[in-house]
Image (cartoon, grey):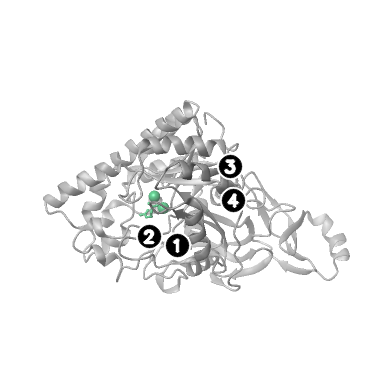
Amino acid sequence: MSALILRGGTVVSGSDSKKLNVMIRDDKIETVFEDHELEAILERESDAEVIDVTGKLLFPGFIDPHTHFQMQASKCVTADDFDSGTRAALAGGTTVILDFTTQDKGESLMSALSRWHEMADGHSSCDYGFHMSITDWNEQVHHEIPLMTLEGVTSYKLYMAYPKLRVRDEVFYEVLKAVKNEGGIVGNHCENGDMIDALTADLREEGKLGTEAHPIAHCREIEAEAVQRYLMIAKLAGAPVNIVHLSTKAGLEYAREARKNGQKVMIETCPQYFFLDDSLYSLPDFEGAKYVFSPPARKKEDQDALWEALENGEIDTIGTDHCSFNFATDKHIGEYEFSQIPNGIPGVEHRPVLMYTYGVQTGRISNESFCRVMSENAAKEYGMYPQKGVIAEGSDADIVVWDPDYEGVISAETQVQNVDYTPYEGMKIKGRAQLVFLHGKPAAAEGQVIAKGLGKYVHRDKADLSFRKVGD
Ligand code: URP
Ligand code: ZN
Ligand code: ZN
């Protein structure tokens, strides 16, 4: 098979950026080489296709470690399934998503995993893997943990909130110990579910049923206490942990303290916690429902703390928690009471442009930091490195040719996501994925998918958490 050469670009990794050429053969990166080698290589590879990417940045395909596609809520299903969700991801430069397989009560983990494979296999346009959400812990499920490793599932998410999903503290303790033995990692939805129920009951009694009540029922203390409790359980279990969709300054401070005390704590946050705030819940005409997700959008003080943490390298990964519900239909299910509004927002398509525009272009983070939080760290934490997360010899040829000069505006009218709004409507962007290679094939260009259905299941290995030193 003849080679493909990307010539003249700047290859970005988590540690440096270098002007390098990249040679792809079939679905792998064959070599990365300097200009002085170009002539000899072109002579040898006389039938190679050469694409000039001068002035462009080359990033390893972005990884979104937090999506919910085709997720059943109590009265509806998410607007994006694996077909539209993975197309939207790819259009924005994301070449791997990790979705959440959720065990039903009484179900085996194998059965839950098969259901997710059925939804995703053959329907995906970017690569995908699964975290496992355990909702019903028992001896049989315990014995299935090593089986999950064999199936390529090495990460888990448990919930402290949501009536149908949450588990008791002792289950957290048992799961953390079992997953630690497998070299995996457990994430937690850190919200105190009992207190959400109690505050919601109070608000109901007071007749406060509008969207502005959502951040009151899910106030900051609800997250902070859950983060603290999770860290305490993890310490006793002697296990590393992942705090997913961290939203508060108080929660961040507990995580910092645990790190200082020697715990291995991974932190994920999401674009919504940098860009959206709780004033949105007071919008008229039920517009606030567009922003009902949990944990909710917070205050400027929390946003500032998260930006500072990102700048300091304290945030490991940025996921989207993409969980899209149509405003016109699904969100209106909760028209008469905020607690009935399906929780979640779209974001899988716009995460790269948002974080690049407002993170890199503003000088808050470097291209290298962007590469770490958008790709490299997730590849390591979730057992995909160096197959994914780096442009290097032998790695999958998943490459984003990034145009740092493109200017545009985010709009639901032009998005690939199959949902009737975007929470980022009208936001200006600078930079975008001009061309996206998946397994060595051009799969998306200028915000549109050009090759559908190329996505494969990523069979993952153990977590490699060595990029986060104990104490930092
Ligand atoms: O509102 C949200 N985040 N919905 C998706 C489920 C979850 O908690 O991650
Ligand atoms: Zn969650
Ligand atoms: Zn989620």
- Residue 337, percent across and down? 20, 59
Binning the other alpha carbons within 10 Å of mark 3 as few (below 14), some (14 to 19) or many (20 upward) gives: many
> What is the three-letter code of the residue carrying label 1?
Phe
Residue occupied by mark 2: 345
Residue occupied by mark 1: 69
Q: Earlier in the sequence, mark 3 or mark 1?
A: 1
Q: CA distance from mark 2 to mark 3?
A: 28 Å
Identify whether 437 is placed above or below 264: below
| Mark 2 CB near ligand 1 (8 Å cut) | yes
Circle 2: element type:
loop
| Circle 2/circle 3 CB separation < 8 Å | no
Q: Horizontally, is 385 left or right of 73 in the view? A: right
Q: For residue 193, what is the image quadrant?
A: top left
Q: Quadrant of the N terminus?
A: bottom right
Q: CA distance from mark 4 to mark 3?
A: 11 Å
Can you see residue 372? yes
Front in this rendered view, residue 150 or 421: 150
| Circle 1/circle 2 CB separation < 8 Å | no
Q: Earlier in the sequence, mark 2 or mark 3?
A: 2
Residue in view at x 28 percent, y 52 percent: 278
> What is the three-letter code of the residue carrying label 3?
Ala
> What is the three-letter code of the residue carrying label 2?
Ile
Q: Earlier in the sequence, mark 1 or mark 2?
A: 1
Looking at the image, is mark 4 or mark 1 nearer the viewer? 4
Looking at the image, is mark 4 or mark 2 nearer the viewer? 4
Residue occupied by mark 4: 152
Identify whether 228 is placed above or below 355: above
Q: Earlier in the sequence, mark 4 or mark 3?
A: 4
Q: CA distance from mark 3 to mark 1?
A: 24 Å
Identify whether 22 is placed above or below 242: below
